[in-house]
Amino acid sequence: MLIIPTRRILIFGFLAFVLIGLEQGILGLFVAELGAQLSRSPEELGLFFALHGLGSAIVTGSALISRLEQRNNKRIPLAGLALSIGGFLIVYGDSWGLKLLAAPLLGIGFGGLSMSFNTLFVTHFSQKNAGLLNVLNATYGLGAVAAPWLVSTDLYSGTEVFLAIAVLSLVVTIGGWSIDDRVPSNLPAIESTDRGIRTAAPLLVTAFLILFLEAGLTYWMPSLLAESSDNELIGASYMAAFFGWFVVVRLGAAALATWVSTLGFALIGLGGVLASLLLVSTGFIPLSETSFIGAFMGLIFPNAYAWMLMTGHGGTALGAKLLLSAITGATVGPWVLGWIWPIFGDVVVLLTLAATSALSVLIMLSIHFQARKILVID
């Protein structure tokens, strides 16, 4: 394994997370705009999101193939190159087929950079300064805020944002060429007892549901808002505020982590999303005034992921499986909603997401109380 310069990890880690934040912040808006320009159906737009998730699944799943993992010390530059090519293709591709080709490339860039730098930050910095990992993920949120804000204020178009992502991704490709993210695990192997097997399955289901919910909200909100309003910038304004809440609450959670458990944060987030979606579905709150849902979303996945690893006595293998299950949820969710929306309408889409949140809460509480019962028996 190569000797990794700390300064290089910091510089290109933060730059990479700004870029994947920009990509996530602009993706739903840009695809909604493409759908209108090219007269594409919700099912076709859902396929784009699904292919994006497939790209992330491919790069994450490759880490579980030991022979490939032993030989590939270039995941970061390859992910940066994929993000760059995807960015250029989605802008300059002159056919829907080329734009669909961009989707998995963007997903490979997003998944590869996220997995690699999270691993490196945890390994090299978390024991000295746990706040750095939280700051890294908050940087992603800043990028996700900046992209829709730039569009909503007419400073830049979605096309220009994607071109900036494509160009700066080449910088990450070049600068990250000597960074090897293959960090061997020092954690004990996961126990293969009946108890461990019983625990792992519901944890994987939970990871799937949570990303089904998160991807469904972030990818489809711009389209739902565009359908219900004549203001073409409402989606951009909404998503800028959504991710603004997301960043503030994530940083706040890091400060309050001494007093609130990871399970507590995740349940608060899921409960808040559930209540908000039910209020919208029943007409108490207009959809356009619910950008505060981003605050609840910011609490869910990082805390749920940490709780799942601790509950499953996890190491590298369980972590990779949880991420793959989560990516599958992020892939399937937007695609399924793309079929539900034209048939059943906006309310059923929102109720589907609400039901996903409620089911996640029930499974997590069930696992928690089962684990406590086993602990008492032991």
Image (spheres, rainbow, N blue to C red):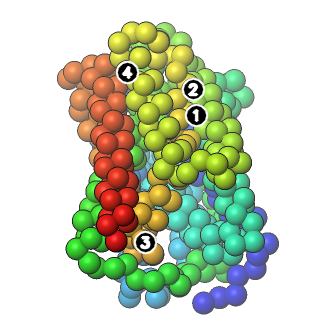
Instruction: Tell me the quarter of the picture where residue 198 sits.
Output: bottom left
Q: Which residue is mark 4?
A: 278
Q: Secondary structure at mark 1?
A: helix
**Sequence-wise first label, 1 or 4:** 4
Disc ID at residue 314: 3
**Which residue is more in the foreground, 263 or 186?**
263
Q: Is 205 left or right of 375, judged from the image as shown?
A: left
Q: CA distance from mark 3 to mark 4?
A: 34 Å
Q: CA distance from mark 1 to mark 2?
A: 5 Å
Q: Which residue is mark 2?
A: 292
**Sequence-wise first label, 4 or 2:** 4
Q: Are marks 1 and 2 in contact (CB under 8 Å)?
A: yes
Q: Is 132 left or right of 290, judged from the image as shown?
A: right
**Which residue is more in the foreground, 229 or 295?**
295
Q: CA distance from mark 1 to mark 4?
A: 16 Å
Number of the front mark, 2 or 3: 3
Give the residue type at disc 2.
Phe
